Image (spheres, rainbow, N blue to C red):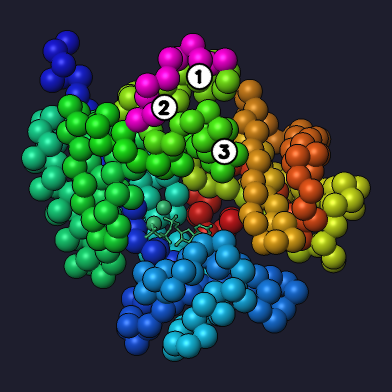
């Protein structure tokens, strides 16, 4: 096989300020104002966190995850719009967009509610110029039909395409040809690399790795020593712009439940008791839907509103309630050992679902 034949062309599409843009679309009078979409907590008042904000609000420093009260303070001198999340609206619009995107792809993988990777290799015959034109066509169609803007990265693999999509936001289009992949990544801060969360970022900085280029220069043996075999190899490849993972269909169905505790606490037993109730409820929905799951995750909102999640992938699919309970407990205990924060909200989620009855719609779960 020649190199040309092996070169893939992947487009990663990510909608701009998605939840807030959906709200603007439904109510055009919001358009020139800061728009902040909020997840209000069960405690009432203004307690809760920012889900996302439009780019006008971002200029004032508003960010996803920040307490609503802080966003209000940042926007106190301007006329701003604060709205509660309307998941049903976002799911419906997402579904419409995903079906447009599918029409442009030889291989398709939805990665979240507002993003997808498209393998377009065959239809552009390995040609990045044609891929750029195709990506423009996608942007135009989404704007025409859905009145929404998105950003697209075109690259030889999913990893670089995804970073490319975030490179010139909003309404961006970034094409990275194979020869440029490594140089494109090199100056970017290490935190931009997929898989480098806040904790890993700290470790990297301690090792003197500030940019993806710094990481690319490290010897793979040294990375394996610090991060273990699997991650060490991944970081080495990723920093060099290498990612061979295929674009594959996957179910993004998930079943989850989250609740606000009566009071902030770091008493494991108290949190575990609530977690058990959530597990029971999630398990009931798993069984009702004749699903089996392969990943179990917990979500934690701490007293300072920081959001944490931990996920474990099992060896095989199951619908066993005891597995769900045991894994979520273990994830909780491990989180609490490594954190001094009181817990405010706790949630549990199962993903990687396989289903006997495929007709279940996404909106029934969530
Ligand atoms: N989201 C959320 N809480 C977060 C991050 C995201 O509720 N901490 C939701 C709201 C976002 C949507 O997921 O609109 C998509 O997340 P993105 O990270 O893609 O962010 P946006 O689409 O809002 O902005 P961007 O223009 O940077 O893509
Ligand atoms: Ca987005
Ligand atoms: Ca996204």
Image: 327 above or below 268: above
Marks 3/1 in contact by CB < 8 Å: the verdict is no
Read off the residue under disc 3.
Answer: 202
Q: Give the class, few, some or many, for how many residues have Cα within 10 Å of label 2's Cα (few <14, many ≥20).
A: many
Q: Position of residue 11 (x, y in %)?
A: 25, 42
> Counting residues from the N terminus, which is met first, the one under dot 3 or under dot 1?
3
- Cβ at disc 3 under 8 Å from ligand 1: no
Q: Is residue 217 magenta?
A: yes
Image: 221 above or below 36: above
Q: Position of residue 209 (x, y in %)?
A: 46, 31
Q: Give the class, few, some or many, for how many residues have Cα within 10 Å of label 1's Cα (few <14, many ≥20).
A: some
Read off the residue under disc 2.
Answer: 215
Can you tell me which quadrant of the image ligand 1 is in? bottom left
> Counting residues from the N terminus, which is met first, the one under dot 2 or under dot 1?
2
Separation of residues labelled 3 and 1 (CA atoms): 15 Å
Q: Quadrant of residue 55?
A: bottom left
* Circle 1: element type: helix
Separation of residues labelled 3 and 2 (CA atoms): 13 Å
Read off the residue under disc 1.
Answer: 223
Q: Which segment is the magenta one?
A: 213-225
Separation of residues labelled 2 and 1 (CA atoms): 9 Å
Q: Residue at x 37, y 50 (%)?
A: 115
Of residues 276 and 338, the one drawn nearer to the viewer in this rendering: 338
Q: Give the class, few, some or many, for how many residues have Cα within 10 Å of label 3's Cα (few <14, many ≥20).
A: some
């Amino acid at each position: 096989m020649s190199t040309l034949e092996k070169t893939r062309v992947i487009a990663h599409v990510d909608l701009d300020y998605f939840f807030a843009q959906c709200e603007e679309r439904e109510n055009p009078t919001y358009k020139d104002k800061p728009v902040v979409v909020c997840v209000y907590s069960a405690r009432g008042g203004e307690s809760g966190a920012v889900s996302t904000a439009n780019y006008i609000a971002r200029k004032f420093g508003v960010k996803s995850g920040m307490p609503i009260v802080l966003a209000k303070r940042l926007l106190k001198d301007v006329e701003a719009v604060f709205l509660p999340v309307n998941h049903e609206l976002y799911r419906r619009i997402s579904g419409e967009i995903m079906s447009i995107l599918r029409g442009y792809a030889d291989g398709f993988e939805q990665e979240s509610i507002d993003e997808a990777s498209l393998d377009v290799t065959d239809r552009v015959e390995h040609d990045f110029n044609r891929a750029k034109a195709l990506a423009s066509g996608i942007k135009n169609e989404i704007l025409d039909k859905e009145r929404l803007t998105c950003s697209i990265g075109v690259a030889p693999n999913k990893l670089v395409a995804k970073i490319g999509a975030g490179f010139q936001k909003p309404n961006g289009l970034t094409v990275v040809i194979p020869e440029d992949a490594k140089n494109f990544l090199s100056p970017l801060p290490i935190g931009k690399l997929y898989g480098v969360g806040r904790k890993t970022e700290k470790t990297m900085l301690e090792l003197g790795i500030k940019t993806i280029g710094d990481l690319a220069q490290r010897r793979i043996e040294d990375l394996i020593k610090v991060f273990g075999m699997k991650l060490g190899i991944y970081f080495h490849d990723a920093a060099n712009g290498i990612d061979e993972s295929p674009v594959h269909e996957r179910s993004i169905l998930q079943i989850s439940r989250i609740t606000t505790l009566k009071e902030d606490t770091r008493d494991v037993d108290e949190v575990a008791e609530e977690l058990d109730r959530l597990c029971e409820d999630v398990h009931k929905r798993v069984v009702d839907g004749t699903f089996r799951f392969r990943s179990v995750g917990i979500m934690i909102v701490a007293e300072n509103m920081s959001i944490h999640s931990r996920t474990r992938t099992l060896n095989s699919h199951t619908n066993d309630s005891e597995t769900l309970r045991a894994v979520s407990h273990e994830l909780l205990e491990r989180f609490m050992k490594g954190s001094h924060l009181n817990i405010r909200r706790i949630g549990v989620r199962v993903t990687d679902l396989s289903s006997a009855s495929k007709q279940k719609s996404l909106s029934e779960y969530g």
